[in-house]
Amino acid sequence: MEYSLFILVAPFFLFLVLGLLGMKMKPKVAGIIGTIGMGLCAICAYTVAYQYFFQTGKVGEVWQQIIPLNFEWLRFTENLHIDLGILLDPISVMMLVVITTVSLMVHIYSLGYMHGETGFQRYYALLSLFSFSMLGLVVATNIFQMYIFWELVGVSSYSLIGFYYTKPSAVSASKKAFIVTRFADLGFLIGILILSYYTKTFDFGTLTANHAELVTTSLAGGTFMGLSLATWALTLIFMGGAGKSAMFPLHIWLPDAMEGPTPVSALIHAATMVVAGVFLVARLFPVYFFAAPDVLELIAYVGTFTALFAAVIAITQTDIKRVLAFSTISQIAYMMVALGVSDYGGHDGLGYMASMFHLFTHAFFKALLFLGAGSVIHAVHSNEMSQMGNLRKYMPITNITFAIACLAIAGIPPFSGFFSKDEILAAAFHNHPLIFWTLWAVAGLTAFYMWRLYYCIFWNTPKGDLAAEHSADSNSLQGVGGHHHTPHESPWTMAAPLIILAVFSVFSGLIPFADFISSDNRPFHAHIDWVVASLSIGVGVIGIAIATVLYLKKSDKPAEIAQSLGVFYKAALHKFYLDEVWMWVTQTVIFKYICMPIAWFDRHIIDAAMNGLAWTTQKSADSVKGLQSGQVQFYAWVFVAGSILIAVLVLFT
Amino acid sequence: MDFSNFLLMGQEIGLIVVFLLLFSYDIIGSEQSKNRWFHLIACIEFAILTIWGFVSPLPAGEAFGGMFVTSDLTVLMKNILNIATLIVFLQAYSWLNKENPVRRSEFFTITLVTLLGMYLMISAGNFMMLYIGMETASLPMACLAAFNKHKEKSAEAGVKYVLISALSSGIMLFGLSFLYGALGSFYFSDLTLNVVGEPLTILGFVFFLGGLGFKLSLVPFHLWTADVYEGAPTNVTAYLSVVSKGAAAFALIFVLYKVFGGIEVVWQHILWWLSVITITLGNLFAIRQTDIKRFFAFSSISQAGYILLGIIAGNAQGMEATVYFIFVYLFSNLAAFAVISAVEHASKGNTSIAAFNGLYNNNPKLALLMTFAVFSLGGIPPFAGFFSKFLIFMAAGSVGQYLLVFIALLNTVISLFYYLLIVKAMFIKKGESDAVAHFSSDIYNRISMLICLLGIFATGILWGVFSEQYF
């Protein structure tokens, strides 16, 4: 399967071509080149997946780790070297499919959505770079390669979030995303260094082999501040994952990142980059499970809290992309919890499988939601719910596909989200009642806020003055730009990806995932736990019902309820003031007590040393200039004298 | 005599064939056809030789009773020299065809002879062979330096080169006679076992080192460098600074590792001091230069000091690092010389650094290539020069030479200062009246620039491949 290299090379090559030559092409040409390239890449990924899952992947009853390509890149010592290669195993092949599919959809969709934007070519170049980095991340054979691509993902998402670089809010959002994830990556890097210092390897295969024996033995005994070394290393690595996957309290960058173009949000903040953290934990799952089960416990609780926390905030938001952002945080947290509560091997590893399953289904329906939201924004030129309503008449395709995605995320059978969410709940049900009931409640909240969103966009009529205007001229809505026009369905380039993703969202839940992905790479049989299933369907239906009562028609009830909740509502609306807390921490604590002394040291010690060096250099350069006299007899003299001097020094010292 | 010995000399014979073909063409061909085709044919023939060196499986072994030795490593070293020579040939197009059409073929044939000498230096298994190789490389080199004989500076460069070269040969032979006197043989394989720290051997070694130090332009054997580099035609300077220096470094590696392994402590001590003063003095002089060719003369002196840093390690890692360093240095330095020769040509022979003022405005691509080149020479990631310096430091660090690495690091900071002076001239000092107007280089030079550009990026990222292949 050497051709799997093409999946990586193609987007990188596209990035170079579009980045260097893009400005010489017509925007449309650049877009089409990028899309076709991504299409080929996707076809290649499907072929790899078909070959892996149906032909070569399974030997006996075990899924193999196939490494079609690997070469040594940097060698530090005999044992410690950085390789670059491609690792194919069930989760990486699955990720290849997810990433290329969503990326291709986004490429097609952007042809319509970004039409006429300045920097269209740059946009496609960056999309290719992002796809390249993400694909490189999932097929990494070792943790350092993953780290390299991890950072590349960070950089490319930074430039995509800040795509509208003339808009101050986009600039600050991209900086925020970059700095917060970089901060988390510092933990990741330290974790990698600790792990590799003791195990003398970066290789995933070696780290996870034989129930992570290498890690448990080589890190055994060491403790630091009362916790074992393995706990430290793996917690720090999880910190990196938590940054990318927006776990509390490192989630603050994700809502702001919605400043980027909407298709970018679909690609980065729904399907690919934000699940990198989940993927990282899944990749190292045996290490976590055998070397530091306490960290796994921590992951479960962090995930549970994040899921609840984000769901509560999502209810109060009025910007449709922010609702989706918080719902993403909440759903990613679901996946983390599933990993956290999972055991190893066979049916006990249900959580692991469920996590990957949910990652798979969520990628499609969340991308669909974002692209649908993009379609709506494209039509009404606003992100605010209050500017929308009644759009179902004008945008039938968007309406239906969005409804499908909402049903999927609410966990209503037979849509895909039901199956994966049910497995997660089932995994939690048996071991952790507290986590189970919290997740159960979150499922209800999810159904509620998603359907609130849906009704507010497609049913509920606009409020206030706009409503009056609306009744006077029922065919017009006011956009942000102040111009009147009738919202209309998006062009086919945008509608087609919606339909394709809707098909995925309906049917992807029917895949018997346990046959392909499991914690110990041996297929097992998973069945639907009907007790859990009926509980989760019930709470989903209740959530939808409440949303229907409150938001199907315009009413004052939601406002009254908000009023009665008082402080709590206000806190949720302001995202529990976490941005402000972080601001205080950075400005008051970090800037004042850490950065200021460092800056002083830099200016007065480091700079002074460099200035001293420069001064010395200048002076000595002045004093030796006579040596280069241009007279050849002098040169000869120095030559001979130098030789003799060296000989004398060597012989007599 | 067994003629199968010649089978081992594949690359040498190939080189002689190329030489003879070009030489015959020079004699037979009409002036008109030579004007049109000579340069192209020369480049193609040499390119074929270069590629052949990489793809054909060349045997390893000893010929002529141990006089001539070849191995995978010598093949690699010769290939590296070939690449550099090819790039120099490509760069020489404007100079040869515009200024010296009559003597065009002389440049190629003379250069090929020096290259043959360098092959012999690398493959030598005997000090006499090494000496003959060195002389074969040195004497024609003086002709090359004096190639623009109507120019006073070029003639001066030739004379200086030949004088110092004669002196260094004398000193080297003096050293060799000590070695022979002490040990009774010139064969490397005989000497290996017998070299111990006797004073006469050490004395012999020091004088021998003086001879090679001249080629490498190590302080204090370096004083000719600046004058010759400045006076010689730019393309010859490029050849001197990369190929001639590389060959000397390769020969030095073999001699030190193979012959003088027994007195490793002694030569490590000598090289320690030589590398410190070479890097430092090279830097100190480079700062003050106003002529770009003199500037690169001192920059190349300081780079030679870094080469010693790798050799000092005295183990396989050091050898790998040194060969790799030269490989990367080739691309970076020749990229710089491609730009220098283009700018010199466009500005009618002006080689002052001021000729680069505002280059970015009118010729942004050249300015960028020059920037990449000096960044790579200075060792800034992600350019290849960073990786090669890193490896050199690793190699020296692996034998505990931390102080040396620290001094070299300090010098890297200084070197960045003067490399950035050129960048500053190109990007910041704009709007001055003497900026070179926009021009396009000839196709040959463009190809050479492309090769160098690829080299500057690819050799850094792909060194793992390189290292797996040969070490």
Image (cartoon, coloured by chain):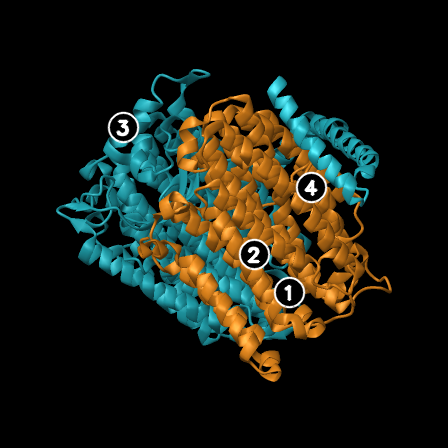
Chain colours: A cyan, B orange
| Residue A322 x, y percent position in the rendering | 53, 51
- Of the residues shown, which amino acid type is indicated by label 2? Thr
Residue depicted at 40% across the width and 33% down the height = B190
Left or right of A301? Residue B137 is: right
Q: Residue beneath label 2, please?
A: B114
Instruction: Specify few, some or many for label 4: CA neighbours under 10 Å numbering under 14, 14-19, or 20 or more.
Output: many
Chain for disc number 1: A
Whether marks 2 and 4 lie on the same chain? yes
- Indicate which disc, 2 or 4, sits on the residue closer to the N terminus: 2
Left or right of B321? Residue A352 is: left
Chain for disc number 3: A
| Residue B48 x, y percent position in the rendering | 45, 67
Q: CA distance from mark 1 to mark 3?
A: 60 Å
Of badges 1 and 3, the one in the foreground is: 3
- Of the residues shown, which amino acid type is indicated by label 4? His
Q: Residue beneath label 3, please?
A: A213
Q: CA distance from mark 1 to mark 2?
A: 75 Å
Q: CA distance from mark 3 to mark 2?
A: 60 Å
Q: Residue beneath label 4, please?
A: B222
Asked if residue B264 is positioned above or below residue A82 in the image, the reply reads: above
Q: Residue beneath label 1, please?
A: A480
| Residue A163 x, y percent position in the rendering | 60, 58
Determine which quarter of the picture holds residue B434: bottom right
- Front one among B367 and A265: B367
Asked if residue B399 is positioned above or below residue A618 in the image, the reply reads: above
Instruction: Specify few, some or many for label 1: CA neighbours under 10 Å numbering under 14, 14-19, or 20 or more.
Output: few
Q: CA distance from mark 4 to mark 1?
A: 73 Å
- Of the residues shown, which amino acid type is indicated by label 1? Val
Of badges 3 and 2, the one in the foreground is: 2
- Indicate which disc, 1 or 3, sits on the residue closer to the N terminus: 3
